[in-house]
Amino acid sequence: YLLGKSDKYDARDVERLQQDDKWVENYLIWRHDVVDDTLKMIDESFQWRKDYTVNDLTESVLPKWLFENGSLFLHGYDKEGYKLFWFRVKHHTRDPKQQLEKKKLVAFWLEHYAKRDHGKPLTVVFDMSETGISHIDLDFVRFIVSCFTDYYPNFLTKIVIFEMPWIMNAAFKIVKGWLGPDAISMLKFTNKSDVQEYISGEYLPPHMGGTDSFKYSYPPLVDDDFQTPLCENGPITSEDEHESKEEIDADTKETGELNEEQSLNQKKMNSLEQISKSEETDKTEIKPKNAKKALTTFKGPLLHISPAEELYFGSKETGEKKCLIVLTNVTKNIVAFKVRTTAPEKYRVKPSNSSCEPGTSLDIIVSLHGGFAASLQDRFLIMAAEMDQSSGAGVPELTQFWKEVPRTKVMEHRLRCHVVESSKPSSLTLKENVFNIPAKNNEDLHIQLTRLLQINRRLQEQIERCLWFQQLSVVISLLSVTVVAFCFYLAYTQRS
């Protein structure tokens, strides 16, 4: 079906489709496992991706004024931990000459996030405060809706519409028709009094009743506010500042111990023996004793990272406050890395700025600090870059290296947090037992719910068919009785 139209597609999309099972699964989920509908959606979305050159959309390709306008950007998370895609309607003006470029900006942001966070769904926020009839652009709104309904499968969790003016009610009745029955339930009309049912105040600007001091500006491209986390002895100084001699000596000693341990334990993943040694040399840290290998691994060009997507922390009740990240260097050179987080006041990371020898694995302990609890909104960023063999791996050399390395040579990978309330997942967590059952995440539950709804729909169809046959049988029976009665009546009248 698809190969016959290969000239209409970007070869990179076809290659990804053949290799990315998650992408295929999202198409199937979004089309309720109906193969013909799924193939049709893939066909349409692939043609659209080629027409809009989605794989080649970059900051340098799009006009700078589009980014400076601030009508579209990614920032913050909703209460379920999904990224927020903001559309500040008051900054948008209708202009047919600029429409194509604005649509490409939407495609740029969606593709940028889809590749960065492995297709994790988004929550769209239409901030319609201070807007009027002059800001209504149904063609542009329809394009945004189509991106989620037709081009990016299983990529939308909800659409939060804030303070929609009454004059736009008629317009949004049309939008409901574009969404279709499955997506209408995702529309959430809110105002200042109830918007925090979906988005906590820390990610809402003051005019929406929140406390977020974020103000959009460009450049640089808006991203999560990743910062250096707490290290073993408190906050690490900024990489742009000069570290004191005492901090350098302490960190150099720690790095030396880590390098010595790596040389003795080359090509060794998360093992019990290595964790036991760490416990003996560090009385202040309690490392996982029964940690298992993560079921998923992100395979980057420089590092393989386990787990691939989520760090599992326990709630305050379960008491699990530590997670393990395993980095494996798959290059022939030393790879420098550093870890950042959106909540630096909560977490301690050891090591947070170090290097990994060729062909070796290294464990990173992420632990909650003090009485803090993990949140679905928390994120971690792992940055890695290849070093020359002649470069040193001490803290002064690493500090200088990160100042000089080009951004194009830095590999980035993001991890999100998952809070386990009762049962424990099969990833690298503290006090984990081999008999624990993996917890279901939101995506698994969504898949199961979709399948249950599909089964329910099929059962309803079967019941309706049965009822139809039952009614037909009743009608036929009544007709038969009527015919027989009529025959008896005719026979009786003829005899008399």
Image: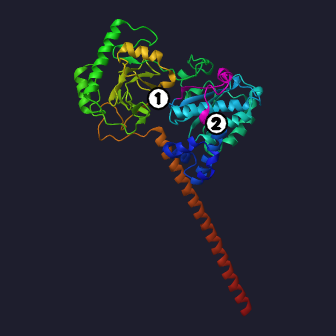
For the residue pair 446 and 285, the one nearer the viewer reads as 285
- Is tag 2's residue or tag 1's residue first in the polypeptide sequence? 2
Q: Position of residue 457 (x, y in %)?
A: 56, 53
Does 56 appear above or below 348? below
Q: Position of residue 407 (x, y in %)?
A: 51, 22
Give the CA distance from mark 2 to mark 1. Answer: 25 Å
For the point 31% across and 36% down, which residue is it? Answer: 292
| The stretch drawn in magenta includes residue 69 | yes
| The stretch drawn in magenta includes residue 94 | no
**From the viewer's perspective, is the residue at label 2 or at label 1 nearer?**
2
For the residue pair 169 and 132, the one nearer the viewer reads as 132
For the point 56% across and 49% down, which residue is it? Answer: 32
For the residue pair 420 and 411, the one nearer the viewer reads as 411
Mark 2 residue type = Thr
Does 180 appear above or below 134? below
Residue 159 seen in render: no
Q: Quadrant of residue 255?
A: top left
Q: Point out which mark residue 414 bears.
A: 1
Compared across the picture, whether 449 is left or right of 331 comes to right
Q: Looking at this rendering, what residue extends furthest in the left direction?
A: 280
- Mark 1 Cα-neighbour bin, 10 Å: few <14, some 14–19, many ≥20: some
The answer to whether the residues at label 2 and label 1 have Cβ atoms under 8 Å apart is no
The quarter of the picture where the N terminus appears is bottom right
- Mark 2 Cα-neighbour bin, 10 Å: few <14, some 14–19, many ≥20: some
Mark 1 residue type = Arg
The quarter of the picture where the C terminus appears is bottom right
Residue at label 2?
Answer: 53
For the point 75% across and 36% down, which residue is it? Answer: 170
